[in-house]
Image (tube, rainbow, N blue to C red):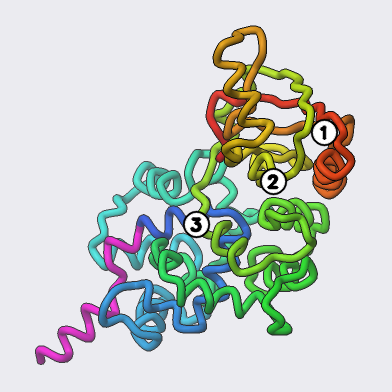
Amino acid sequence: DEARGSARRRSTLHARQVPNMRNYWGLSNFKRAAFGMLAPHGGASGLGPGLGARDLLDIFQSLDADHSGELTLAKLRQGMETAGLGLGSGPRGWRTWLERTFGNEGQAESAVAPSGSERKVSYHTFVASILDRRAFEQEDVCWMAFSLFDKNGNGRITIKELEEVLRDSGVQEVADQEAVESLMEQIDLNCDGEIDFYEFVEALRRPPVDPSKAQIVDGFYVTLEHAGVGDMELVPSPFTRGRFCIKKVTKGSAVWLWNQRCEDDSLEKPLKPGDEIVSVNGEAGNLQRMLQELRLCASEDRPMRVHAVRWSESPV
């Protein structure tokens, strides 16, 4: 009896997994794809002790009352109420649950498909949505996810492989080339056209930024002599496609010395971590060309003229 009771408890959706489900839909396509790829490959280890693949299937089937193999939001709500998770009843309770699960009212509306029928949740997506968000703090879990993205096993992820994973994981049914390219730019920190393991982990662990809360507070130009690509650690901007953000200024570099001088001269502006680089010597909108111009500034001793903007909320 004790064993049956233990198995029954493991086969019930736990209250601690509800925030995971709510947060899942607010993750970037990349992070949802990573959880989606992990779901059928041992990702259940992120659910807590004692939960295995069989338990997950039992939970899903207990919610899937008509055995269709998919969950509508109504079925999910009903099953969670049966599990005693207190979603409330009636239209008000239903709306509150939708808003808590999908965010604001507009996102709650998007839980309904364009045809007016409810969006369906597959078993695969269900498992991905309840995985512990802290799973990627473990390096072995990161390696597992990376290997699933790295289709040919060469230790690097190409844009084609990234596109395939977004499609195969169910995150992006129709490949939007521009969106995939934008995502690639955000993850590929050294702009070599591929994603290595360290860039992959950095993207998975990067905290989300809400651009709606950030406002540009300043725009300015800086002209530097004897500066180059090594003066700053740059990452693709999470706010604006085709721009870099300064993550770190190298101590002792020309930019660092400039910043020291700016402390004594309020008429000039320093380049700070979090500033967004709009252009370098007129090169704008293409990260590869901007990076190449930074390299040429160092190799050919060109002046480096940077157009930068500063946000009220730092992107990095």
Does the magenta run of residues contain 208? no
Does the residue at mark 2 contact the one at mark 1 (Cβ under 8 Å)?
A: no
Answer with mark 3 or mark 2, whichever residue precedes in sequence. Answer: 3
Q: Which residue is mark 3?
A: 205
Front in this rendered view, residue 126 or 154: 154
Q: What residue is at 27 percent from the left and 67 percent from the top? A: 14
Magenta part of the protein: which range? 1-18
In the rendered image, the residue lying farthest to the left is 2
Using the image, determine if residue 73 lies above or below residue 138: above
Instruction: Give the percent coordinates (x, y) of residue 163.
Output: 75, 67
From the viewer's perspective, tell me whether residue 113 is left or right of residue 38.
right
From the viewer's perspective, tell me whether residue 198 is left or right of residue 73.
right
Marks 2 and 1, how far apart in space? 14 Å
What kind of residue is marked 1? Val
Instruction: Give the percent coordinates (x, y) of residue 277.
Output: 73, 33
Instruction: Say the numbered circle drawn on residue 280.
Output: 1
What kind of residue is marked 2? Pro
Front in this rendered view, residue 236 or 113: 236
Q: What residue is at 43 percent from the left and 51 percent from the top? A: 101
Answer with mark 3 or mark 1, whichever residue precedes in sequence. Answer: 3
Q: Which residue is mark 2?
A: 236
Q: What residue is at 78 percent from the left and 33 percent from the top? A: 226
Residue 33 visible (yes or no): yes
Instruction: Give the percent coordinates (x, y) of residue 175.
Output: 78, 63
Q: What residue is at 42 percent from the left and 60 percent from the top? A: 21
